[in-house]
Structure formats: C-alpha cells, structure tokens
Amino acid sequence: MVVAPTVLLSVGLFQAPPQGDPTEAEIQAIIEKFAAKESEFARARENYTYRQMVRIEELDEGGNVRGRFEVVSDIILSPEGRRTERVVRAPVPTLKRIQLTPEDEQDIRNVQPFVLTKEDIGKYWVRYLGRQQVDEITCYVFAVKPKKMEPGQRYFQGLIWVDDQDLQIVKTYGRGVGLLKKGYDNQFPKFETYRAQIDGKYWFPVWTNADDTLYFETGPQRIRMRIRYEDYKQFKADVQIRYGEPVQTPPQPPQPQPKRP
C-alpha cells in the first residue's frame, strides 16, 4: 500500500521456551515432512473452488472508518483445469490516503494464504522455536525468513504454526516482503491467517486479519484488513469424455425384403 511511492519493516519473532524440544535431526525431519504435506495440499487445493472476500479499511485518528476497498471474487475452475478469478462484487473504492499496489495484490493471492511447499522451502530459513497450543491443537512453531529476494517476487516473513499430527500449517503471523524500487514508499501490514480442516484431510485458509499502523514518509496511517475464504467445493466435471472406448451402434430396423416379380 502506498501513500506516495517501501521501507521493509522487520517482524518481531516469537520466542518459545525450549521445553521437550526435539533433536536437530528430528527438527529437520519434521520440516521435510510438513513441506511434503504442504505440497500435497497445494496440489489438492487446485481442485477446489471457493469465494474470497477482501475488505481493507482506512481509519482516522479516532479509529473511525474513513475509506474502504472491497472486492468479492469467486475462484473457479474450467473443465480443462484453468483457474480464473471472477469478480462478483466490487463497490467503488473510497480510500483517501492509501491505494493498493501490485505488491498488495500479490500478497492477497499468495502471501496471506501462505503455503510452504517442498518446492519453495529451499528459498527460506526455517528456525524451530518450540511448541504452542492453537485452539487446543499442539503445534510446532517455526520462524520463517527468505534467504534471498528476487526482483518481482513476494515472500512471507514471520511465524508459522504446524499441527504436530497432520503436519500442515494451521496459522501464520507475519507480513509480505520483497525487493522494491529505491524511494518507493510502499508499506505492508502484519497479518494473521488461520486455517481450518475443510474436508477432513487438508487445512484450508479460512480468514486473514490485519490491524496495523503503516508508517509512511507522510505520516502514520492505521489500516484494517479482513479476508474471508468461504464455500470450498471440490471441482468435478458433470460430463466425462473417455477416449478409446468402443462406440455403441444403435440397432438398425429390419430392412424389407425385395418382392419377386
């Protein structure tokens, strides 16, 4: 989000007491296993449609809403498997001091619903912090930070909570980071994303909340963000076409025999 044209703000990392910590070898095995599970989830998620509701509010000094951005979209799949985003509702934005940037849009799509797959985990430093309960779920807590940032790419930096049974991320807390043009005053809020078990097997993002003050060169601006991910449905085509199967020829009516002269 920009007021004019980012200075990256560091995320304070959670420190957990090392009670009953696994060994270094066990920690590495846990990381490898949950990254593999996240890859499995990422592939499964490609077969689901859902509705995404984004609301970003700009607050004044008294905490009153001064401007708002809102968009409701359906993430849908074609029979060929192509994912598209269809806007259902998008009122005219009334934001006055801030505006959304392409980096904000990338964060909404990929960073807020963060998935740390085995294909991407090599891009991050992952440090074990301890165990913690999240809504009665015992989790491993890890600090996550990108090793190197490439131009045009967005990354997550913060904390992840991994279910110690299902080995999937159930909660994230942090912010989106990335390389920006020098002098580009683009700020990104700290956010918290929760997942829930949708189909009895995978943990899907269900909501993201942020209530943060962004410190622009022109002064501070408090923003509030709410994202909801709802109505997950596994996509199934109504018609299946199978190639190579025998074609059933309809029976032909009996032909009349020619009469003899």
Image: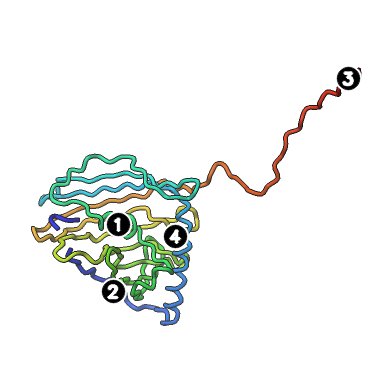
Q: CA distance from mark 3 to mark 4?
A: 72 Å
What numbered label is drawn on residue 58? none
- Mark before the other along the chain sequence, 3 or 1: 1
In the image, farthest residue toward the bottom: 24
From the image, which quarter does the C terminus lie in?
top right
Q: In the image, which disc is placed on residue 15?
A: 2
Across and down, in percent, residue 161 comes to: 37, 66
User: What is the quadrant of residue 184 in the picture?
Assistant: bottom left
Task: Say which amino acid is labelled 2.
Answer: Gln
Circle nearer the viewer, 1 or 2: 1
Dot 2 crowding, Cα within 10 Å, few <14, some 14–19, many 20+: few
Badge 2 or badge 4: first in the primary sequence: 2
**Extreme residue toward the left, this view:** 218
Tag of residue 42: 4
Instruction: Name the amino acid, label 1.
Output: Gln
The residue drawn where x is 42% and y is 46% is 76
**Label 3 vs 2, first from the N-terminus:** 2
Q: Which type of secondary structure does the marked residue at label 2 adopt? A: loop
**Mark number for residue 259?**
3
Q: Secondary structure at mark 4?
A: helix
